Amino acid sequence: MRANQGIGKETAYQLSLRGAKIIIGCRDELRAENAIKEIVSRNPNANIIHIKLDLSSLQSIRAFVQQIYENETKIDLLINNAGIGFTPELKTADGFELAFGTNHLGHYLLTLQLLPLLRKAPKARVVNVSSMAQAFGRIHFENINLRNGVYNQSDAYSQSKLANVLFTRELAKRLGPDSTVTAYALHPGAIQTEWYRNMNSRVAQAMARIMGRIVGLSVERGCQTTLYCALEESLDNESGFFYANCLRVHNMPTNSRDDKSAEQLWHLSADLVQLEDHYKLTKHAWSTTA
């Protein structure tokens, strides 16, 4: 998980209290080291390490995965919680729009390449931290990188968060009902963290900061739905759904339960990241309903 700040760090701390061995993947090594120091200061028994991971770089993801395979025999839980957004128009190292490339493609590649290790655990879960912003999203298949003057911060973020939901849905379908690996997407709530720092307007930053303090959850409360999806035993028999406030959301927007778009996004993502054949996951004949 990306755990150098906000709910990622708090989630790592909470899992450390439960005796988990934790590997955090972060681009900023200094921030990662500081986060680990803070977690260990709160829980001296924490078993936690950092491996460098830049989710906006396909090369970095593959290097991270290689290190995991060299040192681990199985993975019980993968939490994908990158949430970059509201930035000026920027590209990843591979030329993708930054939010889509990081929040979706990065998670897609990481998950598919780690799936063999997830399958080696008796039970394993993939938890994708999305957002209620997914309800306003649309996958711009005709212009996935929002180029040619159509880039908008909100549209880019919402597209990436909708992609998280559709990826979770399609992953569950392809794994099938008898899989030992299950997948969940969630909205953590409005968190009092630094997400507003990427806004390119000082006025917008100030307003978002004020609203975050008024209506935002603390990171302790904000990570509860992540922990619920990661640990709640009653979820063993469901997969592919979206959760908020530790409850499954049943009335999802049409875009968020569009199986055709989910499959199209899956194939597009595989092509964009040049997913190796041995990591590809064939379609399973079952479906989720939400």
Image: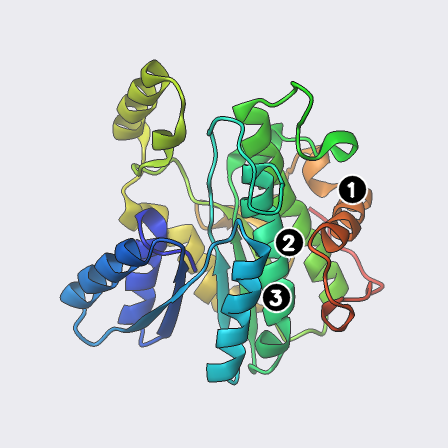
Q: In front: mark 1 or mark 3?
A: 1
Q: Point out residue 121 in the picture as x, y percentages from the top left corner.
A: 55, 81
Given the image, on which type of amino acid does mark 3 rest?
Thr
Name the residue: 74% across, 67% down. 276
Residue drawn at 46 percent across, 29 percent down: 87
Viewer-side residue, 139 vs 231? 139
Element at label 1? helix
* 71 sits to left or right of 166: left
The image's mark for residue 98 is none
Numbered mark located on residue 168 in the image: 2
Q: Quadrant of residue 38?
A: bottom left
| 184 shown above or below 282 | above
Q: Which residue is mark 1?
A: 261
Of residues 203 and 183, the one nearer the viewer is: 203
**Label for residue 182?**
3
Residue found at x 59% / y 70%? 114
Which of disc 2 and disc 1 is earlier in sequence?
2
Kindly check if marks 1 and 2 are in contact, taking CB atoms under 8 A apart as contact.
Answer: no
